Amino acid sequence: MTFKIRTIEEKDIMETYEVIRNAFWDVYTPGCDEHYMVQQIRKVPEYIPELELVALDKDKIVGHVIFVKTVILTDQGKELEVISLGPIGVLPGYQRLGIGGQLIKTAIKRAQAAKFRTILLYGDPEIYRRKGFVPAETYGIRTADNVYMPACQIYPLENITKEEFAGKYFEHPCYQIDEQAAQEFDRQFSPRISRTGLASQRRFNKLIQEIRPFKG
């Protein structure tokens, strides 16, 4: 099933917040703050507007993805520019129809045309390996805390080597959440009940437990 993919427009802003909020509600933790995160990304100079895409079913936005520039500080002491994917979300009623994959494929083509070298994200490896991502550890890439995290995934946009890219991946500061500000932002949306103990939350906690120290 194919959905229309296009660059975001000003009129889409509020609807994309709703899409991301509904897509992430209770997935990793009770409630969510990913819609607030999208707002934060849009404020920084490293935000990449041409890679913020929406998927449409007629005139209804059913999926959304956003990117921001950041860096890897390599073990050789160099800063390499990379781009971070996410949040990416699809409305619950439209999931498992390939929309996320369509958004990612379109973004990959645009990112390659713009000469970006690689995409990184934090997500469930079981989901993203089906979309061509591999563990960042494959290239010796750790988190800013110098640990290997299974959720950290990479999609090279050109031929890259471990020798060049091994190092620490620094998520952009816009991904850091001020919980009070996020709660205030969420008040403009319809109230929702939060749930705990869901399978997706248990999966998230399991991935956190699989973090391993780097022994360089």
Image (cartoon, rainbow, N blue to C red):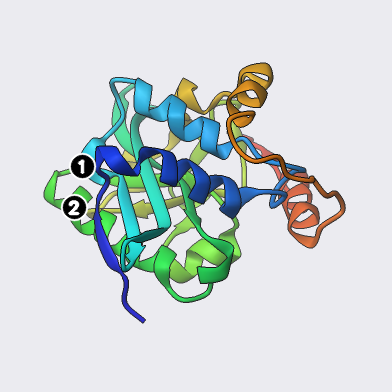
The disc label shown at residue 50, or none: 1
State if disc 1 and disc 2 touch (CB < 8 Å): yes
- Mark 2 crowd level (few <14, some 14–19, many ≥20, 10 Å Cα): some
Residue found at x 51% / y 28%: 175
* SS at badge 2: helix
Q: Earlier in the sequence, mark 2 or mark 1?
A: 1
Q: Is residue 81 left or right of residue 202?
A: left
Can you say whether 41 is above or below 203 in the image? above
The disc label shown at residue 91, or none: none
- Measured as percent of width and height from the top left, residue 55 is found at 34, 60
Which residue is outermost to the bottom? 1
* SS at badge 1: helix
- Measured as percent of width and height from the top left, residue 104 is found at 35, 59
Q: Is residue 199 left or right of residue 7?
A: right
Rendering quarter of residue 188:
top right
178 or 181, which is in the foreground? Answer: 181
- Residue denoted by label 2: 110
Can you say whether 19 is above or below 5 in the image? above
85 or 193, which is in the foreground? Answer: 193
83 or 80, which is in the foreground? Answer: 83
Mark 2–mark 1 distance (CA, rounded to whole Å) = 8 Å
- Measured as percent of width and height from the top left, residue 152 is found at 54, 46
Residue found at x 53% / y 31%: 36
Q: Amino acid at mark 1?
A: Glu
Residue found at x 40% / y 52%: 64
Q: Amino acid at mark 2?
A: Arg
Can you say whether 82 is above or below 133 in the image? above
Q: Is residue 54 left or right of residue 150?
A: left
